[in-house]
């Protein structure tokens, strides 16, 4: 009969490493408080024995699960990847585990995922943007779940957020585009219903048009989900108009990539025949041909700061602070000056 191997304990690790159980605990929970030589010896013992900390005991002692939930609209493109990676890295450095869900931009799925993550004991939640049923916020307040908004910033709201002003950011780009001589503007926007980021960016272009004496009613706008193929189809439709735009402003870099691809298929030169802009400055923007003029969003810094603030909210029971991050315009090869 085979012998059942016993599960290694904290005492086993301490004996093998020649330290106290308290030192082992510090190495696992606060490694920066232990000198490197001791930490190396302890971690070698942990690996040799195959020791796994008793998560349940830690949860009972701290009355927390050390788990943070993040609910994002999509995993199908890179819009959220860089910020979420930085968010996870920072959480890990502070001893927290990240659980990620995706909604496919469907509010009913987000509501289900909020309840599911809370039921699984998430200590806090990261949500993208503000636009959702007020009942969700009420549900989270009643259960005292710290919640932080990212990828958006709205002055005057009492919900903690680490993000940027989508409307003002796109308005800045629109003003720049118009200052370069473009008067015939077309827009490929994300679907604005239930998406305050897409709505803010579209309104930013309208604001920029008004700032410069243009009639927003004359700007052709196509709303479409954030996919490369959809950007290509929308661009094709815009180019069939009697008056072709001199610039197509896209709600994000993914749509812009589709537009650039379709321009090439139509034998149109970007930017000589038509300029194209994006929003986000994901890695794709720098490898397109031509490289994409876009709004640079500090995704990694946003993710890192969001993690720091959300952990503070969890551990101190405070409502959290909001911070607006600065964006910048990246002028690249896809935008041509007409003036």
Image (cartoon, rainbow, N blue to C red):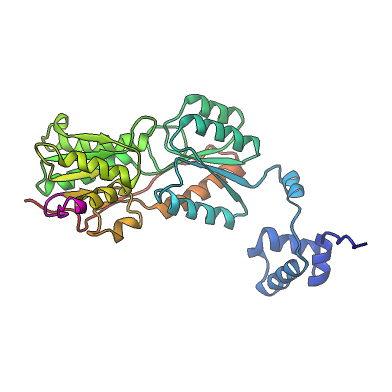
Residue 250 position (above or below residue 91): above
Residue at 84% in and 62% down: 11
On screen, residue 132 versus residue 186, left or right, reads right
Image quadrant in which you'd find residue 245: top left
Q: Is residue 83 visible?
A: yes
Where is residue 142 shown, x and y percent of the image? 60, 27
Q: Residue furthest right?
A: 1
Residue at 48% in and 25% down: 134
Q: Nearer the viewer, residue 25 or 188?
A: 188
Q: Nearer the viewer, residue 315 or 105?
A: 105
Residue at 42% in and 31% down: 131
| Picture mark count | 0
Where is residue 295 shown, x and y percent of the image? 28, 50
Q: Nearer the viewer, residue 169 or 37?
A: 169
Where is residue 119 shown, x and y percent of the image? 65, 35
Overall secondary structure of the magenta section? loop
Residue 1 position (above or below residue 213): below
Q: Which quarter of the image is occupied by the N terminus?
A: bottom right
Residue at 53% in and 56% down: 89
Where is residue 60 shown, x and y percent of the image? 75, 44
Image quadrant in which you'd find residue 104: top left
Q: Is residue 273 magenta?
A: yes
Q: Is residue 171 visible?
A: no
Residue 279 position (above or below residue 192): below
Q: Is residue 94 magenta?
A: no
Q: Which residues are magenta?
A: 264-274
Q: Residue furthest left?
A: 339
């Amino acid at each position: 009969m085979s012998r059942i191997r016993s599960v290694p304990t904290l005492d086993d690790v301490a004996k093998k490493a020649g330290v106290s159980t308290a030192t082992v605990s510090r190495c696992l929970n606060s490694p920066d408080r232990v000198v490197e030589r001791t930490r190396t010896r302890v971690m070698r013992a942990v690996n040799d024995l195959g020791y796994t900390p008793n998560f349940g005991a830690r949860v009972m002692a701290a009355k927390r699960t050390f788990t943070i939930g993040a609910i994002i609209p999509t995993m199908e493109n890179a819009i959220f990847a860089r910020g979420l990676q930085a968010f996870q890295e920072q959480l890990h450095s502070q001893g927290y585990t990240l659980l990620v869900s995706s909604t496919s931009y469907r509010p009913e799925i987000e509501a289900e995922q909020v309840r599911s993550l809370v039921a699984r004991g998430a200590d806090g939640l990261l949500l993208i943007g503000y636009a959702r049923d007020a009942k969700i916020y009420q549900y989270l307040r009643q259960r005292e779940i710290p919640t932080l908004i990212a990828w958006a910033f709205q002055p005057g709201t009492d919900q903690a957020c680490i993000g940027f002003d989508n409307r003002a950011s796109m308005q800045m780009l629109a003003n720049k585009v118009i200052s370069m001589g473009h008067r015939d503007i077309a827009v490929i926007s994300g679907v604005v219903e239930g998406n305050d980021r897409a709505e803010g960016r579209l309104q930013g272009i309208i604001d920029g048009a008004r700032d410069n004496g243009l009639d927003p009613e004359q700007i052709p706008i196509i709303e479409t989900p954030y996919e490369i193929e959809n950007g290509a189809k929308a661009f094709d439709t815009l180019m069939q108009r009697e008056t072709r735009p001199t610039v197509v402003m896209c709600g994000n870099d993914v749509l812009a990539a589709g537009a650039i691809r379709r321009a090439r298929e139509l034998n149109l030169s970007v930017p000589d025949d038509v300029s194209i802009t994006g929003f986000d400055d994901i890695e794709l923007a720098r490898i397109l041909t031509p490289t994409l003029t876009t709004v640079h969003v500090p995704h990694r810094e946003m993710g890192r700061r969001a993690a720091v603030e959300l952990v503070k909210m969890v551990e101190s029971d405070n409502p959290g602070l909001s911070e607006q991050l600065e964006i910048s315009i990246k002028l690249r090869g896809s935008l041509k000056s007409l003036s």
